[in-house]
Amino acid sequence: MKQSISILGSTGSIGVSTLDVVARHPDRFSVFALTAAVQVDALLSQCQRFSPRYAVMSSPLHAQQLREKTRALGLAVEVLEGPAALDQVASDSEVTTVMASIVGAAGLSSCLAAALAGKRLLLANKEALVVGADVFLSAVRTGGATMLPIDSEHSAIFQSLPEDAHCWDDRVEKIILTSSGGPFRERPVAHLSSVTSQEACAHPNWQMGRKISVDSATMMNKALEVIEAHYLFGLPPERIEVVIHPQSVIHSMVQYRDTSVVAQLGTPDMRVPIAYGLGWPARIASGAQALDFKTLSAMTFEAIDSFGHPERFPGLWLSWQVLRASPGSTAVLNAANEVGVEAFLNGRIRFDQIHHLNVETLAAYMPPAPHSLEDVLFIDQQARRTALGVCQRWSV
């Protein structure tokens, strides 16, 4: 049966890659809804090509702009607006599959809506698990949703685990997330305070949005992935490791009880895990270039604490810290980091101050245990207020 897909965050890098894969398989997929925050013209172009039933913008102003342009072109698409509309297109009865690629905590509500509606949920928004944690997992269980990870590392882990989920704990010793080390892997630590936003967004291997690129440069992206891996696969923090792999060929690994290691390899192209999620359990063409082992010169690895990495990437260690802290602490870390990255990109704080802002926010705000979406959103809002207060005391 053809999958009817809602792509949440369709103008971002994951959304664009998803549409590229979808376009290669018109017999398998149809587009039900596309959503964007502010990129009116980009979403208009996608509506022209993929003819969704709905297009959603985040604000009334941008929705009205898109509405006028679609009418002028005679497009049969209904333009909606706001968070409630995102929930609507994520849970509509005609939707079979939801690509959740809205960056940050803003995508949590629509992820929960898709989960409770029992959708095939392709999770590219790691914050849904980092922020929502047990509340989100409860929604997945309650709705009977099929949740498939789209992050390249978590997709690699999923592909390398036993097919029978009930055997994971008995057979698996640990999971190993790989990291390229980002653009500053070899940069002198003393020079990190002068990093510009342009430098931080220039990842050596991957083409990504600005926020996730900065997270990769600070290694906070990997910290969030450690948290996500804990909730996705149910392993305790001490059985999750990170290793530096600059070539980004091995996307992650699983070490079994007998010391065998199973890994997933591929080119650094997000269309690969996207195609895996869309086609699962089948394998479909992604459009990505295949690895050429004849020209692959080397695959190297570095321990995360070698060559000064603890000082270079201090934010990584916060993941294990918050996983052992009180419930809700992962949401505090995510909120503080979102505030810090935005402040850095806007020139209000230095690159190296993002980590200090995260640490100060975690120390200043002890969250109550969350039991609902409202609780989670309250923690997120309070953490942001705390982080903004810290940020306002600093100047670049």
Image: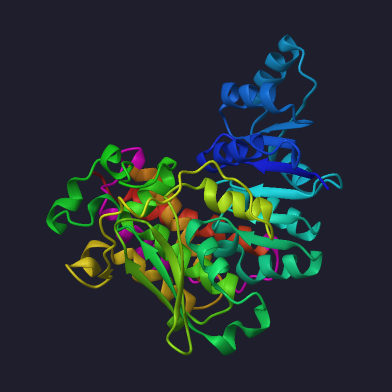
Residue appearing at x 32%, y 57% in the figure: 180
Q: Is residue 123 left or right of residue 204?
A: right
**View extreme (top): residue:** 72
Is residue 346 within the magenta segment? yes
Residue appearing at x 68%, y 69% in the figure: 137
Question: Where is 373 relative to 46, above or below?
Answer: below
Residues shaded magenta:
345-374
Residue appearing at x 60%, y 77% in the figure: 162
Q: Where is residue 30 in the image (x, y as percent from the top left)?
A: 76, 37
From the viewer's side, name the closer residue of 357 and 110: 110
Question: Where is 194 relative to 82, above or below?
Answer: below
Is residue 135 visible in the rendered structure shown here? yes
Q: Is residue 351 left or right of residue 38?
A: left
Q: Is residue 156 left or right of residue 145?
A: left
In the picture, residue 43 is in which quadrant?
Answer: top right
Is residue 286 within the magenta segment? no
